[in-house]
Image (tube, grey):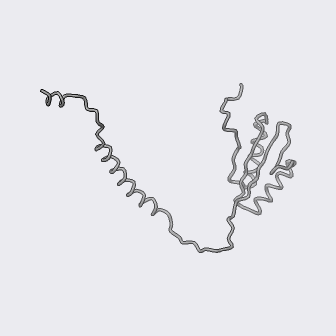
């Protein structure tokens, strides 16, 4: 009777065999697909140089205050000077990037004007800076 009671009792051990089987199958799948993904890139061994410097794209930081002032890289500029500076930066570096910051009370039209300005001067990479810590909807 003791042997029969043990067979019908609660199994208190975890069977890890199915888990190991699944992990091995996933490992095999990842090993096979990683090889295929890495072959999609063109393999090139670049020459080395001791006097190289990495090229960073030109970054324009455009800020608009609630008072209506426009800043470019920390300096106050007029709309005409902003246009000239952006055009000059794009002429020097085709990969110029812009980060646009504006006080939350700045009108939507002013932000669109700056976006239109940088896009019309061939700045293809731009972003609008936000404060991600405060995720509250504005009052209506």
Q: Is residue 108 above or below residue 81?
A: above
Q: Residue 129 or 11: which is nearer the viewer?
A: 11
| Residue 3, quarter of the rendered image | top left
Q: Residue furthest top?
A: 140
| Residue 30, quarter of the rendered image | bottom left
Q: Position of residue 107 (x, y in %)?
A: 78, 35
| Residue 34, quarter of the rendered image | bottom left
Q: Position of residue 40 (x, y in %)?
A: 47, 62
> What is the quadrant of the C terminus in the image?
top right
Q: Say whether residue 50 is left or right of residue 87.
A: left
Q: Say whether residue 53 is left or right of residue 19.
A: right
Q: Position of residue 134 (x, y in %)?
A: 68, 33
Residue beneath the point at 75% across and 43% down: 101
Q: Is residue 54 above or below residue 130?
A: below
Residue beneath the point at 73% across and 48% down: 99
Residue beneath the point at 82% across and 52% down: 83
Numbered circles on residues, count? 0
Q: Say whether residue 42 is left or right of residue 68.
A: left
Q: Position of residue 96 (x, y in %)?
A: 72, 57
Q: Residue furthest left?
A: 1
> What is the quadrant of the N terminus in the image?
top left
Residue beneath the point at 64% across and 74% down: 49
Q: Residue furthest front?
A: 2
Q: Residue 18 or 16: which is nearer the viewer?
A: 16
Q: Residue 22 or 94: which is nearer the viewer?
A: 22
């Amino acid at each position: 009777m003791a042997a029969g009671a043990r067979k019908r009792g609660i199994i208190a051990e975890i069977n890890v065999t199915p888990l190991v089987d699944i992990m091995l199958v996933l490992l095999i799948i990842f090993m096979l697909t990683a090889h295929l993904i890495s072959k999609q890139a063109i393999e090139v061994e670049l020459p080395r140089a001791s006097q190289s410097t990495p090229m960073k794209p030109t970054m324009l930081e455009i800020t608009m205050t609630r008072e209506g002032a426009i800043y470019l890289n920390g300096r106050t500029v007029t709309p005409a000077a902003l246009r000239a500076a952006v055009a000059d930066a794009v002429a020097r570096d085709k990969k110029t990037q812009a980060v646009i910051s504006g006080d939350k009370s700045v009108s939507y039209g002013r932000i669109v004007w700056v976006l239109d300005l940088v896009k019309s001067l061939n700045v293809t990479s731009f972003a609008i800076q936000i404060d991600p810590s405060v995720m509250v909807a504005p009052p209506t």
